[in-house]
Amino acid sequence: MNPWILLAISICLEIVATNLLKVSDGFTKLLPTIGSLTLYAISFYFVSLVFRTLSVGLVYAIWSSARVASRQFRQAC
């Protein structure tokens, strides 16, 4: 599969997992906690596949800037 698509999917999964952390209320709610941990695992697996074709620096630069942009967008809305 195209590494750029895998990277985009991985970033989206990581953003959703981060949002589930807030919903889990300090890991006291079971379903959001399990969902968050599962999505993080899948996201990191996809990133490991992306590292096979793209450089680590490029992937982390895109990953972190997408996270910052999504966080700023969430705060603006």
Image: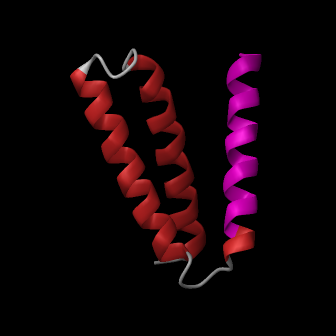
Seen at 67% across and 23% down, the residue is: 74
Give residue 53's quadrant in the image. Answer: bottom right
The quarter in which the N terminus is drawn is bottom left
**Residue extending furthest toward the left:** 30
Locate residue 68: give its quadrant: top right
Query: Where in the figure is residue 67, as x and y percent of width and height?
Result: 67, 43
User: Residue 50 is drawn in which quadrant?
Assistant: bottom right
State the colouring used for the structure image: secondary structure
Front residue of this view, candidates 21 and 8: 21
The answer to whether 74 appears left or right of 13 in the picture is right
How many labels were placed on the picture? Answer: 0
Q: Is residue 58 left or right of residue 54?
A: right
- Quadrant location of the C terminus in the rendered image: top right
- Residue stretch rendered in magenta on the structure: 59-77
User: Can you give x and y, in whole percent of width and height, for residue 29 in the image?
Assistant: 27, 17
Q: In this view, does 64 lie above or below 55?
A: above
In the drawing, does residue 22 fall left or right of residue 65?
Answer: left
Q: Does the stretch in magenta take in 69?
A: yes
* Residue 74 is a magenta residue: yes
Query: What residue is rendered at 71% in x and 51% in y?
Result: 64
Residue beneath the point at 57% across and 58% down: 8
Q: Where does the image place residue 15, in percent across and percent down from the top left?
A: 54, 39
Q: Is the magenta stretch mostly helix, strand or loop?
A: helix
Relative placement, left or right, of 15 versus 74 is: left
